[in-house]
Image (spheres, rainbow, N blue to C red):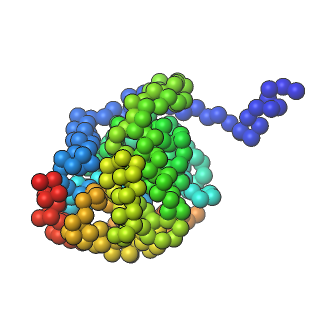
Amino acid sequence: MTTHDIENINVTAFDAMPTPEEIHRRLPITPKATKVITHGRHLLRNILDRKDHRLFVVVGPCSIHDPVAGLDYAHRLKKLSDEVGDTLQIIMRVYFEKPRTTVGWKGYINDPFMDDSFRVDIGMERARQFLLDVAEIGLPTGTEALDPISPQYYGDLITWTAIGARTTESQTHREMSSGLSTPVGFKNGTSGDLGVAVNAILSASKPHSFLGINSHGNVSVVRTKGNRHGHIVLRGGDGRPNYDTVSITMVEQALAKAKLQNNIVVDCSHANSFKKPELQPLVMADIVNQIRLGNQSLLGVMIESNIEAGNQSIPADLSQLKYGCSVTDGCVDWATTEKMIHDAAVLLRDVLPERVA
C-alpha cells in the first residue's frame, strides 16, 4: 500500500492560488483607502470605548454578487452617510463568504461566476478590488470572516468584522479573531445561546498561537496579542427575536458576570425579524426607542439592505438576474433604508451625546 492509497483519498486536486503578497502587489492599498479604513477603525474603537457618542450602523447587501450594483449602492450609501454622520457611523456591509446550512452558493470569493467553476483565485482578487473601490468612495467596510486564510488577502481593507452564528463557537475563528486588526462582533448561536458569544469574546481577547499562512503564502505558526474590541451581536435564535428589553437586560447581566464591557449590537435581520426583511424597520425602531428611554449598552445595529427589496434565486441564465436584488437573504430596498437611517438620526441626534457626557 502506498501513501497515495491512504492520504487525501477524497481530494481531487490542489489548484494553485496566488499568495496574499502577490494579490496585494497587483492591487495595492491607496493613500485614500488607508485613510478611510484607519479613520473608520479609530472611530469604531472610540464608540466601543465610550469616547464617541455615535451609534454604528453596518448596512448593505446580504452578499455581494454583482460589483456594478454593489458600487451603485455604495455611492448612495456614502451620500446618506454624509447626511447623518454627526449621529450615526455608517459602515457598508460587504459580505463575500456565505456559510450554508447544507449546500448552496458560497459567495463571490468561492464562485465569482456563479456557475460552479469555483475560481477562488479570481474571486479573491475581485473581492479585494471591490473593497478598494468602496474605500475610494469614502466608506469603511464590514465583513464576515468565514475562511481563516482570507483576511491575509484583504484584511487591510476592513473596518469591522463579524463572526457568524455558525462559527462563533469555533476555536479556529476565536483564534483568528484574536489577531484581526479590526473590532470583532460575535453573533449569538443559531439556537439563541448567548454563552458561546460571551466565551468567544473572552477567548479572542487573549493571545493565541495557531497554524495559518503569512503574506508569502507560507504555512506559519501565527502568534497574536489578543483583540480587546470583541463584542456581542444579537441576531435572535431558534426562530425567536432577542432584542426586546428583557433579552437585552439578560445579555447585560451575562456580560457583567463575565466582566466584559456592556457593548451590544443588534442584527435587525435573521431571527430578530423572523427572516422577514420587511420587519427590519420595526426592529430598528425598537432599538432606537430603547436608547431614547435610557439604554446605555446598545452601540450598533446591522441591516440587510439592497437597491431592490426581497431576494431572488440564481437562474441558469445569469442575464435574467434582477439588478440590485439579493441572491441570498432578503433585504429592504433603498427607499426603506434611507427612511430607517434618517428616522434613527433624527430621533437620536439629541439623545446620544448624553451617553458620553
Q: Is residue 291 visible?
A: yes
The residue depicted at 28 percent of the width and 72 percent of the height is: 285
Where 21 falls versus 175 (above or below)?
Answer: above
Q: Nearer the viewer, residue 104 or 190?
A: 190
The residue depicted at 46 percent of the width and 40 percent of the height is: 203
Q: Is residue 302 visible?
A: no
- In percent of width and height, residue 43 lies at 22, 46
- In percent of width and height, residue 214 lies at 47, 26
- Which corner quadrant holds the N terminus? top right
Q: Nearer the viewer, residue 297 or 44?
A: 297
Q: Residue 93 lies in what quarter of the image?
A: bottom left
Q: Nearer the viewer, residue 168 or 75?
A: 168
The residue depicted at 23 percent of the width and 34 percent of the height is: 31
The number of callouts visible is 0
- In percent of width and height, residue 211 lies at 54, 29
Q: Residue 229 lies in what quarter of the image?
A: top left
Q: In the figure, is residue 53 to the left or right of 178?
A: left
Q: Residue 8 lies in what quarter of the image?
A: top right
Q: Residue furthest right?
A: 1
Q: In the figure, is residue 118 to the left or right of 342?
A: right
The residue depicted at 77 percent of the width and 37 percent of the height is: 9
Where 64 falls versus 292 (above or below)?
Answer: above
Q: Residue furthest front?
A: 257
Q: In the figure, is residue 255 to the left or right of 321?
A: left
- In percent of width and height, residue 56 lies at 26, 55
Q: In the figure, is residue 13 to the left or right of 307?
A: right
- Which corner quadrant holds the C terminus? bottom left
